Structures are given as structure tokens and as C-alpha cells.
Image: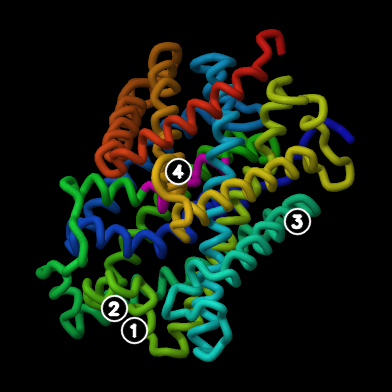
Amino acid sequence: MGNELEKKYGLPTAICMVVGIVIGSGVFFKAQTILQKTGGNMPLGILAWIIGGVVMLVCVLAFSFMAQKYEKVNGIVDYAEATVGKRYAYNIGWFMTIIYYPTLTSVLAWLSARYTLVFITSVNPDFPLLIGADAGGCVVGPECIALMLFYMCCAYAVNALSPKLAGKLQVSTTVIKLIPLGLMAVVGIIYGISNGTLATNFATVADTGASVSGSPLLAAVCATSFAYEGWIIATSINAELRDAKRNLPKALIAGGIIIMAVYIAYYIGVAGGATNQELIDSGATVAFINVFGNVLGNVLNLFIAISCMGTMNGLMLGCVRGMYSLAARGQGPKPEVFVQVDTQTNLPHNSAIMGLLLCGAWGLYFYLACLAGTWSGPFVFDSSELPIITIYAMYIPIFVMWIKKTTGENAIRRLIVPILAIAGSCFMVYACIVGHQMENVWYLIVYVVVMVIGNLFYRKKA
């Protein structure tokens, strides 16, 4: 066992990691949600995608400036330590390790399982499920949950046994996931213009069958946060990226631009492939089948499943390094245990095991509270969105202290971009408060308890 991670990733892997972690499930999963939250208003949904993308880009720019100055073992924690202080950095690291990484990884494992079953049942409608596909078996059935756990363990195994293989997998799945998005963006727009569906969708509002939020745009922007989030996880390979001070900023900026362009083009393409009402009732799958036919449309469902797996792999890459990033600073519980790096695989296996356990715990919560509805009443919240909004809130002190402490930078890098990032982060927090209402209270109670426990392990002299 050693304590150092090798420089094993290059710029292409870093760009694919940014794009691959972000683009995956959210654009498929949340397109339907955004239409529902906007009351079937397509232009308002596109505006929500644009606002969410702009907020992401200004935050990406701000952190890319920091990446050129600071390099250690975990980007976001390094930036917090250099700007705000060691204790704040520890709190961010603890939050990302205990809540952020495992909540998103568990959701992605479920989405990978869901779209796999959607593909299987589309190809073979007679495929036996304990709960039929029409009754939601692809979403909450035991087969879906078993497959979710299997995918979670596979992602852990790939990252634990061969980190280099995990990097190559990230590159290949990024290319694969761009295929259905690119095809739908181009062919869907042409199809929608030719038959008038696109014009109709922009001119009419569908029936959502439910009451719409008093602030539909804010609720929709909050939903885009899941689709746009994940890029910050790429900074977790800071210590393993060759020439990180040069390559990480390039990866963040290039990846952010690609993501925003792909999302907006895809969303418009989907609007060309099906009516707003069809999209609200059946999701984006119906657009794929309308445009490409049953056979190719179902094959593209398989590509979506692979896309989700790639995103999950990228999230697990950050998840297994969570405890290590704390232990490398002498912080957290048993740092002498979690700082150990295996000499054969060059991965902190003890940290990885803890990451997998946390994924399992949050996966259980997500199923009971958000999918099956078994857990109702207090302490029920959307674990796919609220942790993301929390990280935006935690960015704000970093941006403020960057403005206050940084010297030798021009006005754009020191003032304008960080101020825009602060404004964007505040907007996302406000959108979350309006969009989730009472759920915020239950989530914040859990958040405070987790952070109090974390601070019991903080060492001032580490």
C-alpha cells in the first residue's frame, strides 16, 4: 500500500469525463419532467434549459480559473481550502462524500436499470416481469431494483480493479451516448419541420393532468440542475490528470460548451418527434419511435441505457475517492485507513468500499421515498435534485473569497465571472426553495445532522 495516486489521465479523458458525467440520464430523464413543470409549454422549457446551461457555464469558467492556480488531490476541496479555509474545505469534502456522490450514483444506477428494461420489454413485449411494464415494472419492479444493484456493483468493480479501464470506459460511453442525442437533434428537427409538429408544439400548450407550480420556470430550471450537474466531479481526478493546471480548465470549458449545445438541440429535436401531450404522457421514447420506427427507436433505447451506465461510471469514479480526499489531508474518520492506496491498482480500496456502501444506503432511500412511495410523510425529498442545489449554495463562499483574496488577475477573471457565478448560484437556490417548498425543510434537517456528525471528525492540527 502507498499513499500517492499516479498521473494516468490525459486531456481527451478529462473532456470525456466532463461531458460523460453530465450527459447521460438527465437529458432523457428530465425532458418529460420539465414539460410537466412548465404546464406543457415548450418555449418555456427551452428557456429553462438555456438558463440552467448559462448558470453551469459561468460556474465552470470561475472554477477553471481556480484550476489554473491550485492543484492537489480533489479540485473542489482544494479550491475551498485555498479561498475560504481548511475547515470549510473539509465540510465540502464531507458533504460530497456522504451525500452528493452516493445520492447521484444510486439514481444513475436505477436509471441504467430502467432504460435497460425499457429496451428489453420493447424488443420482447412478452418478457416476464413480476410487475408488468404497463404497470410500472420497468420503474419500480423487483427486476429493476436487482439490476440497479448489479450495475452499482459493476461500476465499483471497474473502478476498483482497473482505474485506467474506467477512464477508457468513460471515453467510449461518451461517444456512444452522443449518437442518440445527435441523431434526435438533427433528424428530429428536420422531421418536425417537415410535418409541422415542431411549429404546433411551440404554438400550443399540452394538458399536464396536474396542477402546475406557481413559478413554472423556476421549477423547470431546478429540474435542469440534475441534467447539467456532475462536471465538478471531474475535478476529483485532479491528482491523476497529467498537466492538470493546463488540462483541467480546458476540459471544463470545452465540456461545458458541448453539453449546453447538445442539450438544447436534443430538446428541440424531441419536440419535432412527438407532440407535447405524447411527451408528457410517455416521455422521449415515443419521439424516438415516431422518428426512427420501432426497430431503430428501440435500439436507441439501448444506447440510452449505455449512456446512463457511462454517467454512473463517472460518478462512481468520484464516489470511490471521496474518503481518500479527506484522509489525504489527515481528516475524517480513520484517515490512516482511508488514505491507503493499493500498489497494484493504484486505487484507495478502503475509500472505494465505503463509497459503495453509501451508494447502497442512498439507493435504498431513493427507492422507498421517491419511487415506490413506501416511505411517506416527513423526511421525504427528491434525492436527485436537492443535493445538487446544496452544492451551488456551497460554491458561493468560494466565489466570494476568490474575489476578496485573489491578486494579479484581470477584472474578468477576478470580478465579472465570479460575480455572475454567485448570481447564478443564488438563482438556483431560490429556484429550489420555490420549486420544492416543504421538501427543503426535511432535506436540510438531514443535511445538518450529517454535517454535525462530520465535524466531530475534524482535526484542527491535521
- Label 1 neighbourhood size at 10 Å, few (<14), some (14-19), many (20+)? many
Q: Earlier in the sequence, mark 3 or mark 1?
A: 3
**Given contact means CB atoms under 8 Å apart, are the residues at marks 3 and 1 in contact?**
no
How far is the residue under mark 2 from the one under mark 4?
Answer: 31 Å
**Residue tagged by mark 1?**
291
Q: Earlier in the sequence, mark 2 or mark 1?
A: 2
Residue 66 image position (x, y, % from top left) = 50, 27
How far is the residue under mark 2 from the one under mark 1?
Answer: 6 Å
**Given contact means CB atoms under 8 Å apart, are the residues at marks 3 and 2 in contact?**
no
The three-letter code of the residue at mark 3 reads Ala
Nearest to the eye among marks 3 and 2: give it: 3
- Residue at x-position 36% and y-position 72%: 284
How far is the residue under mark 3 from the one under mark 2?
Answer: 38 Å
Q: Earlier in the sequence, mark 3 or mark 2?
A: 3
Label 1 secondary element: helix
Q: Quadrant of residue 201?
A: bottom left
Q: Which residues are magenta?
A: 225-234
Q: Earlier in the sequence, mark 4 or mark 3?
A: 3
Question: Which numbered dot is residue 273?
Answer: 2
**Residue tagged by mark 3?**
157
